[in-house]
Image (tube, rainbow, N blue to C red):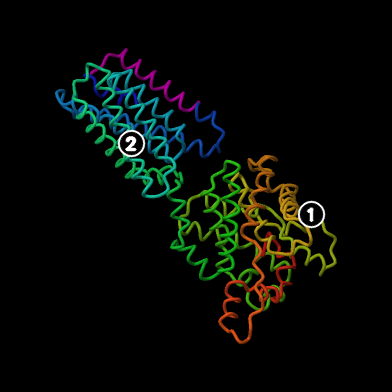
Amino acid sequence: MAALLLLHRTWPVSIFVAIGTTVLALLGAIMLHAHLKAIQIDSELRKKFDRLLWFTSFLAVGGTQIANLAMAPEAANRAGFLLMAPLVAQAMLVAALSTPGISIVGLSVSVLLLGIVGGLPIDLAAGTWLAGAVAAHVVNPLKQRSDLIRAMSVQVLAQSVICVSMTLLMPQITVPAWEAAIWGSIAAVIATAIFWLGVAVFEKLFGIVSDWTLLELCSPEQPLIRELVLRAPGTYAHSVGVGNLAEAAAREVGANPLLCRTMAYYHDIGKTTRPNYFIENQIGDNIHDDLSPNLSAQIIAAHVSDGIELARAQKLPDVVVDGISQHHGTSLITYFYHRAVEQKGLEPNQEAEKKFRYPGPKPQTKESAILHLADVVEAASRVDLKNQTLELFVAKLIEKSRSDGQLDESDLTFKDLGIISESFCRTLRALRHERVQYPPASTANPVGAAVELSEGGSELEDSLPRDRNQSTHDAQSL
Protein backbone atom coordinates (compact mmCIF):
# COMPACT_ATOMS: atom_id res chain seq x y z
CA MET A 1 0.00 0.00 0.00
CA ALA A 2 2.83 2.41 0.86
CA ALA A 3 4.35 1.95 -2.60
CA LEU A 4 1.00 2.77 -4.24
CA LEU A 5 0.65 5.90 -2.16
CA LEU A 6 3.99 7.13 -3.50
CA LEU A 7 3.39 6.40 -7.20
CA HIS A 8 2.67 10.04 -8.04
CA ARG A 9 6.04 11.19 -6.64
CA THR A 10 9.34 11.40 -8.48
CA TRP A 11 11.41 8.29 -7.76
CA PRO A 12 13.58 7.52 -5.91
CA VAL A 13 11.76 9.05 -2.94
CA SER A 14 13.42 10.11 0.30
CA ILE A 15 13.84 7.41 2.93
CA PHE A 16 12.01 9.64 5.41
CA VAL A 17 9.05 10.02 3.06
CA ALA A 18 8.95 6.25 2.57
CA ILE A 19 9.05 5.62 6.32
CA GLY A 20 6.36 8.22 7.01
CA THR A 21 4.08 6.82 4.33
CA THR A 22 4.56 3.27 5.59
CA VAL A 23 3.71 4.30 9.15
CA LEU A 24 0.55 6.04 7.97
CA ALA A 25 -0.50 2.99 5.96
CA LEU A 26 0.05 0.75 8.98
CA LEU A 27 -1.98 3.06 11.19
CA GLY A 28 -4.78 2.93 8.63
CA ALA A 29 -4.65 -0.86 8.66
CA ILE A 30 -4.80 -0.95 12.45
CA MET A 31 -7.77 1.39 12.45
CA LEU A 32 -9.66 -0.73 9.94
CA HIS A 33 -8.98 -3.90 11.89
CA ALA A 34 -9.95 -2.30 15.21
CA HIS A 35 -13.22 -1.01 13.77
CA LEU A 36 -14.20 -4.42 12.43
CA LYS A 37 -13.24 -6.09 15.69
CA ALA A 38 -15.59 -3.75 17.56
CA ILE A 39 -18.56 -4.78 15.40
CA GLN A 40 -20.60 -7.68 16.78
CA ILE A 41 -20.59 -10.03 13.82
CA ASP A 42 -19.56 -13.61 13.22
CA SER A 43 -15.77 -14.02 13.38
CA GLU A 44 -15.63 -15.74 9.99
CA LEU A 45 -17.66 -12.96 8.39
CA ARG A 46 -15.41 -10.39 10.06
CA LYS A 47 -12.38 -11.97 8.40
CA LYS A 48 -14.11 -11.80 5.03
CA PHE A 49 -14.97 -8.12 5.52
CA ASP A 50 -11.40 -7.43 6.62
CA ARG A 51 -10.00 -8.94 3.41
CA LEU A 52 -12.65 -7.15 1.34
CA LEU A 53 -11.77 -3.77 2.85
CA TRP A 54 -8.07 -4.18 2.25
CA PHE A 55 -8.41 -5.48 -1.28
CA THR A 56 -10.84 -2.75 -2.38
CA SER A 57 -8.72 -0.06 -0.68
CA PHE A 58 -5.65 -1.37 -2.50
CA LEU A 59 -7.47 -1.28 -5.85
CA ALA A 60 -9.04 2.13 -5.23
CA VAL A 61 -5.76 3.76 -4.21
CA GLY A 62 -3.94 2.06 -7.09
CA GLY A 63 -6.61 3.08 -9.61
CA THR A 64 -6.55 6.68 -8.42
CA GLN A 65 -2.76 6.86 -8.64
CA ILE A 66 -2.66 5.30 -12.10
CA ALA A 67 -5.31 7.74 -13.32
CA ASN A 68 -3.26 10.52 -11.77
CA LEU A 69 -0.14 9.46 -13.67
CA ALA A 70 -2.02 8.99 -16.94
CA MET A 71 -3.54 12.48 -16.80
CA ALA A 72 -1.49 15.28 -18.34
CA PRO A 73 -0.85 18.26 -16.02
CA GLU A 74 -2.86 20.64 -18.20
CA ALA A 75 -5.80 18.20 -18.24
CA ALA A 76 -5.73 17.59 -14.50
CA ASN A 77 -7.30 20.96 -13.78
CA ARG A 78 -10.27 20.20 -16.00
CA ALA A 79 -10.76 16.44 -15.78
CA GLY A 80 -9.39 15.97 -12.25
CA PHE A 81 -12.89 15.18 -11.00
CA LEU A 82 -12.56 11.79 -12.73
CA LEU A 83 -10.16 10.80 -9.94
CA MET A 84 -13.22 10.42 -7.74
CA ALA A 85 -14.44 7.35 -9.65
CA PRO A 86 -12.20 4.58 -8.17
CA LEU A 87 -12.84 5.69 -4.59
CA VAL A 88 -16.59 6.04 -5.10
CA ALA A 89 -16.61 2.58 -6.69
CA GLN A 90 -14.84 1.24 -3.58
CA ALA A 91 -17.55 2.75 -1.38
CA MET A 92 -20.28 1.17 -3.49
CA LEU A 93 -18.67 -2.28 -3.57
CA VAL A 94 -18.02 -2.50 0.15
CA ALA A 95 -21.47 -1.15 1.03
CA ALA A 96 -23.21 -3.66 -1.24
CA LEU A 97 -21.26 -6.61 0.19
CA SER A 98 -21.18 -5.52 3.84
CA THR A 99 -22.76 -2.39 5.36
CA PRO A 100 -22.64 1.35 4.60
CA GLY A 101 -20.90 1.95 7.94
CA ILE A 102 -18.04 -0.41 7.14
CA SER A 103 -17.84 1.06 3.65
CA ILE A 104 -17.45 4.64 4.94
CA VAL A 105 -14.66 3.58 7.30
CA GLY A 106 -12.74 1.99 4.42
CA LEU A 107 -13.39 5.01 2.21
CA SER A 108 -12.17 7.37 4.94
CA VAL A 109 -8.86 5.55 5.26
CA SER A 110 -8.25 5.54 1.49
CA VAL A 111 -9.16 9.21 1.03
CA LEU A 112 -7.17 10.39 4.07
CA LEU A 113 -4.05 8.52 3.05
CA LEU A 114 -4.22 9.85 -0.52
CA GLY A 115 -4.86 13.36 0.76
CA ILE A 116 -1.99 13.30 3.26
CA VAL A 117 0.61 12.03 0.78
CA GLY A 118 -0.59 14.41 -1.95
CA GLY A 119 -2.14 11.84 -4.26
CA LEU A 120 -5.34 13.88 -4.21
CA PRO A 121 -5.62 17.65 -3.72
CA ILE A 122 -7.18 18.24 -0.31
CA ASP A 123 -10.27 19.92 -1.78
CA LEU A 124 -10.84 17.03 -4.19
CA ALA A 125 -10.27 14.53 -1.34
CA ALA A 126 -13.03 16.20 0.70
CA GLY A 127 -15.42 16.15 -2.26
CA THR A 128 -14.57 12.52 -2.97
CA TRP A 129 -15.35 11.53 0.61
CA LEU A 130 -18.77 13.20 0.41
CA ALA A 131 -19.53 11.52 -2.93
CA GLY A 132 -18.43 8.14 -1.57
CA ALA A 133 -20.57 8.55 1.56
CA VAL A 134 -23.62 9.22 -0.62
CA ALA A 135 -22.79 6.23 -2.82
CA ALA A 136 -22.42 3.89 0.17
CA HIS A 137 -25.97 4.64 1.25
CA VAL A 138 -27.79 4.79 -2.08
CA VAL A 139 -26.39 1.42 -3.18
CA ASN A 140 -27.77 -0.38 -0.13
CA PRO A 141 -30.19 -2.07 -0.41
CA LEU A 142 -29.83 -3.05 -4.04
CA LYS A 143 -32.18 -5.90 -4.97
CA GLN A 144 -33.26 -5.33 -8.56
CA ARG A 145 -32.20 -3.59 -11.76
CA SER A 146 -34.32 -0.53 -11.10
CA ASP A 147 -32.42 -0.06 -7.83
CA LEU A 148 -29.17 0.18 -9.78
CA ILE A 149 -30.64 2.85 -12.07
CA ARG A 150 -31.92 4.71 -9.02
CA ALA A 151 -28.52 4.51 -7.31
CA MET A 152 -26.70 5.76 -10.41
CA SER A 153 -29.16 8.62 -10.90
CA VAL A 154 -28.81 9.79 -7.30
CA GLN A 155 -25.05 9.48 -7.54
CA VAL A 156 -24.89 11.50 -10.78
CA LEU A 157 -26.95 14.26 -9.17
CA ALA A 158 -24.93 14.20 -5.94
CA GLN A 159 -21.53 14.32 -7.63
CA SER A 160 -22.67 17.08 -9.98
CA VAL A 161 -23.78 19.19 -7.01
CA ILE A 162 -20.57 18.44 -5.10
CA CYS A 163 -18.35 19.38 -8.06
CA VAL A 164 -20.27 22.58 -8.78
CA SER A 165 -20.11 23.54 -5.09
CA MET A 166 -16.36 23.00 -5.10
CA THR A 167 -15.92 25.38 -8.07
CA LEU A 168 -17.98 28.03 -6.26
CA LEU A 169 -16.13 27.74 -2.96
CA MET A 170 -12.53 27.21 -4.09
CA PRO A 171 -10.92 29.87 -6.29
CA GLN A 172 -8.07 27.56 -7.28
CA ILE A 173 -10.54 25.47 -9.30
CA THR A 174 -10.91 27.39 -12.55
CA VAL A 175 -13.23 24.96 -14.34
CA PRO A 176 -16.67 26.45 -15.20
CA ALA A 177 -19.50 25.13 -13.04
CA TRP A 178 -21.30 23.47 -15.95
CA GLU A 179 -18.15 21.62 -16.99
CA ALA A 180 -17.50 20.51 -13.40
CA ALA A 181 -21.03 19.09 -13.30
CA ILE A 182 -20.35 17.10 -16.48
CA TRP A 183 -17.07 15.67 -15.19
CA GLY A 184 -18.73 14.79 -11.88
CA SER A 185 -21.54 13.01 -13.71
CA ILE A 186 -19.07 11.06 -15.87
CA ALA A 187 -17.16 10.02 -12.72
CA ALA A 188 -20.43 8.76 -11.17
CA VAL A 189 -21.25 6.69 -14.27
CA ILE A 190 -17.71 5.23 -14.35
CA ALA A 191 -17.91 4.36 -10.64
CA THR A 192 -21.27 2.62 -11.14
CA ALA A 193 -19.89 0.66 -14.10
CA ILE A 194 -16.87 -0.48 -12.04
CA PHE A 195 -19.23 -1.49 -9.23
CA TRP A 196 -21.53 -3.41 -11.57
CA LEU A 197 -18.63 -5.33 -13.09
CA GLY A 198 -16.85 -5.95 -9.79
CA VAL A 199 -19.60 -6.94 -7.38
CA ALA A 200 -20.14 -10.44 -8.79
CA VAL A 201 -16.39 -11.11 -8.94
CA PHE A 202 -15.77 -9.90 -5.40
CA GLU A 203 -18.74 -11.88 -4.13
CA LYS A 204 -17.18 -15.12 -5.34
CA LEU A 205 -13.67 -14.07 -4.42
CA PHE A 206 -14.46 -13.40 -0.75
CA GLY A 207 -17.34 -15.80 -0.24
CA ILE A 208 -19.80 -13.02 0.62
CA VAL A 209 -23.42 -13.39 -0.46
CA SER A 210 -25.23 -10.26 -1.64
CA ASP A 211 -28.99 -9.69 -1.76
CA TRP A 212 -28.82 -10.03 -5.53
CA THR A 213 -27.54 -13.58 -5.25
CA LEU A 214 -30.13 -14.48 -2.60
CA LEU A 215 -32.93 -13.18 -4.81
CA GLU A 216 -31.63 -15.21 -7.74
CA LEU A 217 -31.54 -18.33 -5.56
CA CYS A 218 -35.20 -17.84 -4.61
CA SER A 219 -36.28 -18.01 -8.25
CA PRO A 220 -38.48 -21.01 -9.21
CA GLU A 221 -36.17 -21.46 -12.19
CA GLN A 222 -33.28 -22.54 -9.98
CA PRO A 223 -32.58 -26.25 -10.68
CA LEU A 224 -32.99 -27.44 -7.08
CA ILE A 225 -36.19 -25.45 -6.54
CA ARG A 226 -37.62 -26.73 -9.82
CA GLU A 227 -36.77 -30.28 -8.79
CA LEU A 228 -38.41 -29.72 -5.40
CA VAL A 229 -41.62 -28.47 -7.04
CA LEU A 230 -41.81 -31.45 -9.41
CA ARG A 231 -40.73 -34.28 -7.12
CA ALA A 232 -41.90 -33.10 -3.69
CA PRO A 233 -44.68 -30.51 -4.09
CA GLY A 234 -45.82 -30.96 -0.49
CA THR A 235 -42.32 -30.22 0.75
CA TYR A 236 -42.14 -27.16 -1.50
CA ALA A 237 -45.40 -25.83 -0.03
CA HIS A 238 -44.00 -26.42 3.45
CA SER A 239 -40.76 -24.62 2.53
CA VAL A 240 -42.67 -21.57 1.26
CA GLY A 241 -44.63 -21.50 4.52
CA VAL A 242 -41.41 -21.71 6.51
CA GLY A 243 -40.00 -18.88 4.41
CA ASN A 244 -43.01 -16.66 5.18
CA LEU A 245 -42.64 -17.26 8.92
CA ALA A 246 -38.86 -16.89 8.99
CA GLU A 247 -38.68 -13.76 6.84
CA ALA A 248 -41.24 -11.87 8.91
CA ALA A 249 -39.62 -12.87 12.21
CA ALA A 250 -36.10 -12.05 10.98
CA ARG A 251 -37.16 -8.56 9.99
CA GLU A 252 -38.43 -7.87 13.51
CA VAL A 253 -35.32 -9.07 15.38
CA GLY A 254 -32.75 -7.45 13.11
CA ALA A 255 -31.64 -10.59 11.26
CA ASN A 256 -31.35 -10.89 7.47
CA PRO A 257 -34.90 -11.59 6.22
CA LEU A 258 -33.89 -12.41 2.66
CA LEU A 259 -31.27 -14.89 3.85
CA CYS A 260 -33.89 -16.57 6.08
CA ARG A 261 -36.28 -16.95 3.14
CA THR A 262 -33.55 -18.34 0.89
CA MET A 263 -32.45 -20.88 3.50
CA ALA A 264 -36.09 -21.85 4.04
CA TYR A 265 -36.55 -22.61 0.33
CA TYR A 266 -33.56 -24.94 0.34
CA HIS A 267 -33.62 -26.44 3.86
CA ASP A 268 -35.52 -29.59 2.80
CA ILE A 269 -34.16 -30.14 -0.71
CA GLY A 270 -32.72 -33.46 0.50
CA LYS A 271 -36.28 -34.81 0.53
CA THR A 272 -36.27 -34.87 -3.27
CA THR A 273 -34.06 -37.97 -3.03
CA ARG A 274 -36.88 -40.00 -1.38
CA PRO A 275 -39.96 -37.77 -1.50
CA ASN A 276 -42.54 -40.49 -0.76
CA TYR A 277 -41.04 -41.17 2.66
CA PHE A 278 -42.25 -37.81 3.92
CA ILE A 279 -45.86 -37.34 4.95
CA GLU A 280 -46.46 -34.11 3.05
CA ASN A 281 -45.73 -35.87 -0.26
CA GLN A 282 -47.56 -39.13 0.37
CA ILE A 283 -50.74 -40.18 -1.39
CA GLY A 284 -52.31 -43.36 -0.06
CA ASP A 285 -50.64 -45.63 2.46
CA ASN A 286 -47.82 -44.46 4.70
CA ILE A 287 -44.60 -46.27 3.71
CA HIS A 288 -43.34 -46.08 7.29
CA ASP A 289 -46.12 -48.40 8.48
CA ASP A 290 -44.08 -51.31 7.09
CA LEU A 291 -40.68 -50.14 8.38
CA SER A 292 -39.03 -50.37 11.77
CA PRO A 293 -38.82 -47.12 13.74
CA ASN A 294 -35.01 -47.24 13.59
CA LEU A 295 -34.96 -47.50 9.80
CA SER A 296 -37.62 -44.81 9.44
CA ALA A 297 -35.63 -42.47 11.67
CA GLN A 298 -32.47 -43.06 9.60
CA ILE A 299 -34.33 -42.27 6.39
CA ILE A 300 -35.86 -39.13 7.86
CA ALA A 301 -32.50 -37.92 9.21
CA ALA A 302 -30.78 -38.63 5.88
CA HIS A 303 -32.60 -35.76 4.18
CA VAL A 304 -30.17 -33.37 5.88
CA SER A 305 -27.02 -35.03 4.51
CA ASP A 306 -28.73 -35.55 1.14
CA GLY A 307 -29.58 -31.85 1.05
CA ILE A 308 -26.01 -30.84 1.85
CA GLU A 309 -24.74 -33.08 -0.94
CA LEU A 310 -27.18 -31.61 -3.47
CA ALA A 311 -26.35 -28.06 -2.37
CA ARG A 312 -22.61 -28.68 -2.70
CA ALA A 313 -23.11 -30.17 -6.16
CA GLN A 314 -24.99 -27.02 -7.25
CA LYS A 315 -22.33 -24.81 -5.58
CA LEU A 316 -24.78 -23.00 -3.34
CA PRO A 317 -23.24 -20.40 -1.00
CA ASP A 318 -21.86 -21.77 2.27
CA VAL A 319 -24.37 -19.77 4.31
CA VAL A 320 -27.27 -21.57 2.58
CA VAL A 321 -25.59 -24.95 3.08
CA ASP A 322 -25.21 -24.09 6.77
CA GLY A 323 -28.96 -23.49 6.92
CA ILE A 324 -29.58 -26.97 5.52
CA SER A 325 -27.19 -28.66 7.97
CA GLN A 326 -28.41 -26.73 11.03
CA HIS A 327 -32.17 -26.46 10.52
CA HIS A 328 -32.90 -29.49 12.73
CA GLY A 329 -29.88 -29.10 15.00
CA THR A 330 -29.57 -32.20 17.17
CA SER A 331 -33.31 -32.39 17.88
CA LEU A 332 -35.13 -35.63 18.52
CA ILE A 333 -37.09 -37.39 15.78
CA THR A 334 -39.94 -37.60 18.24
CA TYR A 335 -42.57 -39.65 16.41
CA PHE A 336 -40.35 -42.62 15.64
CA TYR A 337 -38.58 -42.46 18.98
CA HIS A 338 -41.87 -42.84 20.85
CA ARG A 339 -42.97 -45.50 18.39
CA ALA A 340 -39.78 -47.47 19.11
CA VAL A 341 -40.32 -47.09 22.85
CA GLU A 342 -43.88 -48.39 22.54
CA GLN A 343 -43.02 -51.33 20.27
CA LYS A 344 -40.00 -52.52 22.24
CA GLY A 345 -41.27 -51.61 25.67
CA LEU A 346 -38.16 -49.54 26.39
CA GLU A 347 -37.74 -47.01 29.13
CA PRO A 348 -37.13 -43.53 27.67
CA ASN A 349 -33.48 -42.55 28.29
CA GLN A 350 -30.77 -40.40 26.77
CA GLU A 351 -28.81 -43.36 25.42
CA ALA A 352 -31.81 -44.56 23.43
CA GLU A 353 -32.50 -41.03 22.24
CA LYS A 354 -29.08 -40.68 20.59
CA LYS A 355 -30.10 -43.07 17.82
CA PHE A 356 -33.14 -40.92 17.08
CA ARG A 357 -31.50 -37.49 16.97
CA TYR A 358 -30.35 -35.48 13.98
CA PRO A 359 -26.56 -35.23 13.62
CA GLY A 360 -26.43 -31.43 13.91
CA PRO A 361 -24.75 -29.04 14.30
CA LYS A 362 -27.09 -26.83 16.29
CA PRO A 363 -28.03 -23.47 14.76
CA GLN A 364 -25.03 -21.12 14.94
CA THR A 365 -26.56 -17.81 13.84
CA LYS A 366 -29.75 -15.84 14.30
CA GLU A 367 -30.87 -16.71 10.80
CA SER A 368 -30.38 -20.48 11.15
CA ALA A 369 -32.04 -20.44 14.60
CA ILE A 370 -35.06 -18.60 13.19
CA LEU A 371 -35.18 -21.13 10.35
CA HIS A 372 -35.14 -23.98 12.89
CA LEU A 373 -38.03 -22.48 14.87
CA ALA A 374 -40.04 -21.62 11.75
CA ASP A 375 -39.64 -25.19 10.49
CA VAL A 376 -40.94 -26.60 13.78
CA VAL A 377 -43.87 -24.19 14.03
CA GLU A 378 -44.97 -24.45 10.38
CA ALA A 379 -45.07 -28.27 10.46
CA ALA A 380 -46.75 -28.50 13.86
CA SER A 381 -49.31 -25.81 13.01
CA ARG A 382 -50.97 -28.20 10.56
CA VAL A 383 -52.28 -30.43 13.34
CA ASP A 384 -55.23 -29.86 15.66
CA LEU A 385 -54.36 -27.31 18.36
CA LYS A 386 -56.51 -29.29 20.85
CA ASN A 387 -58.33 -26.26 22.28
CA GLN A 388 -55.08 -24.34 22.88
CA THR A 389 -54.69 -20.74 21.87
CA LEU A 390 -52.32 -20.18 18.98
CA GLU A 391 -50.07 -18.06 21.22
CA LEU A 392 -49.73 -20.84 23.80
CA PHE A 393 -49.18 -23.46 21.11
CA VAL A 394 -46.34 -21.50 19.44
CA ALA A 395 -44.78 -20.55 22.79
CA LYS A 396 -44.66 -24.22 23.84
CA LEU A 397 -42.94 -25.23 20.62
CA ILE A 398 -40.31 -22.51 20.97
CA GLU A 399 -39.75 -23.35 24.63
CA LYS A 400 -39.36 -27.02 23.76
CA SER A 401 -36.53 -26.21 21.34
CA ARG A 402 -34.92 -23.83 23.80
CA SER A 403 -35.05 -26.28 26.73
CA ASP A 404 -33.66 -29.01 24.46
CA GLY A 405 -30.59 -26.81 23.93
CA GLN A 406 -31.12 -26.26 20.21
CA LEU A 407 -30.72 -22.48 20.52
CA ASP A 408 -27.71 -22.49 22.86
CA GLU A 409 -25.15 -21.71 20.15
CA SER A 410 -27.13 -19.00 18.36
CA ASP A 411 -27.32 -15.28 19.14
CA LEU A 412 -31.03 -15.22 19.97
CA THR A 413 -31.99 -13.65 23.30
CA PHE A 414 -35.11 -14.23 25.43
CA LYS A 415 -36.40 -10.92 24.12
CA ASP A 416 -35.84 -12.12 20.55
CA LEU A 417 -37.76 -15.33 21.26
CA GLY A 418 -40.75 -13.34 22.50
CA ILE A 419 -40.72 -11.16 19.38
CA ILE A 420 -40.35 -14.23 17.14
CA SER A 421 -43.28 -15.96 18.86
CA GLU A 422 -45.53 -12.94 18.30
CA SER A 423 -44.42 -12.68 14.67
CA PHE A 424 -45.13 -16.37 14.03
CA CYS A 425 -48.64 -15.99 15.45
CA ARG A 426 -49.41 -12.99 13.24
CA THR A 427 -48.14 -14.75 10.13
CA LEU A 428 -50.00 -17.98 10.90
CA ARG A 429 -53.27 -16.12 11.39
CA ALA A 430 -52.80 -14.41 8.03
CA LEU A 431 -51.95 -17.67 6.25
CA ARG A 432 -54.54 -19.89 7.93
CA HIS A 433 -57.56 -17.61 8.02
CA GLU A 434 -61.03 -19.11 8.15
CA ARG A 435 -63.08 -19.35 4.98
CA VAL A 436 -66.60 -18.06 4.57
CA GLN A 437 -69.24 -20.79 4.94
CA TYR A 438 -71.13 -20.92 1.64
CA PRO A 439 -74.79 -22.04 1.55
CA PRO A 440 -75.45 -25.53 0.12
CA ALA A 441 -75.59 -25.47 -3.67
CA SER A 442 -78.79 -26.46 -5.35
CA THR A 443 -78.65 -29.71 -7.31
CA ALA A 444 -80.42 -27.84 -10.09
CA ASN A 445 -77.55 -25.40 -10.28
CA PRO A 446 -74.36 -27.31 -11.18
CA VAL A 447 -72.51 -24.06 -11.88
CA GLY A 448 -73.19 -22.93 -8.32
CA ALA A 449 -71.90 -26.25 -7.02
CA ALA A 450 -68.69 -25.83 -9.00
CA VAL A 451 -68.21 -22.33 -7.65
CA GLU A 452 -68.72 -23.58 -4.11
CA LEU A 453 -66.04 -26.23 -4.49
CA SER A 454 -63.55 -23.86 -6.10
CA GLU A 455 -64.06 -20.77 -3.96
CA GLY A 456 -65.06 -22.16 -0.62
CA GLY A 457 -64.85 -25.91 -0.40
CA SER A 458 -65.11 -25.85 3.40
CA GLU A 459 -67.58 -28.74 3.57
CA LEU A 460 -65.34 -30.84 1.35
CA GLU A 461 -62.26 -29.99 3.42
CA ASP A 462 -64.06 -30.89 6.65
CA SER A 463 -65.00 -34.29 5.26
CA LEU A 464 -61.41 -35.30 4.46
CA PRO A 465 -59.65 -37.66 6.91
CA ARG A 466 -57.16 -35.84 9.13
CA ASP A 467 -55.81 -38.61 11.31
CA ARG A 468 -52.55 -38.82 9.39
CA ASN A 469 -51.62 -35.24 10.17
CA GLN A 470 -53.08 -35.49 13.69
CA SER A 471 -50.62 -38.11 14.74
CA THR A 472 -48.43 -35.09 15.69
CA HIS A 473 -47.03 -34.88 12.13
CA ASP A 474 -43.69 -34.86 13.96
CA ALA A 475 -42.65 -31.27 13.47
CA GLN A 476 -39.01 -32.31 13.41
CA SER A 477 -39.25 -35.17 10.95
CA LEU A 478 -42.27 -35.79 8.77
Evaluate if marks 2 and 1 touch, with contact meaning CB atoms under 8 Å apart. no
> Residue 29 lies in magenta, yes or no?
yes
Magenta region, mostly helix, strand or loop?
helix
> Residue 4 lies in magenta, yes or no?
no
Look at the picture and state if 51 lies above or below 376. above
Image side of residue 185 versus residue 433, left or right:
left
Label located before the other in sequence (2 or 1): 2
Towards the viewer: 171 or 186: 171
Towards the viewer: 249 or 236: 249
Packing grade of label 1 (10 A; few <14, some 14-19, many >=20) is few
Spot occupied by residue 330 in the image (x, y as percentages of width and height): 68, 53
For label 2, the residue is 155
User: In the picture, which quadrant includes the N terminus?
Assistant: top left
SS state under label 2: helix
Towards the viewer: 461 or 333: 461
Range of residues picked out in magenta: 12-34
Look at the picture and state if 403 lies above or below 431. above
Question: On residue 327, which mark appears?
Answer: none
Spot occupied by residue 476 in the image (x, y as percentages of width and height): 68, 59
For label 1, the residue is 350
Spot occupied by residue 366 in the image (x, y as percentages of width and height): 60, 44
Mark 2 vs mark 1: in front: 2
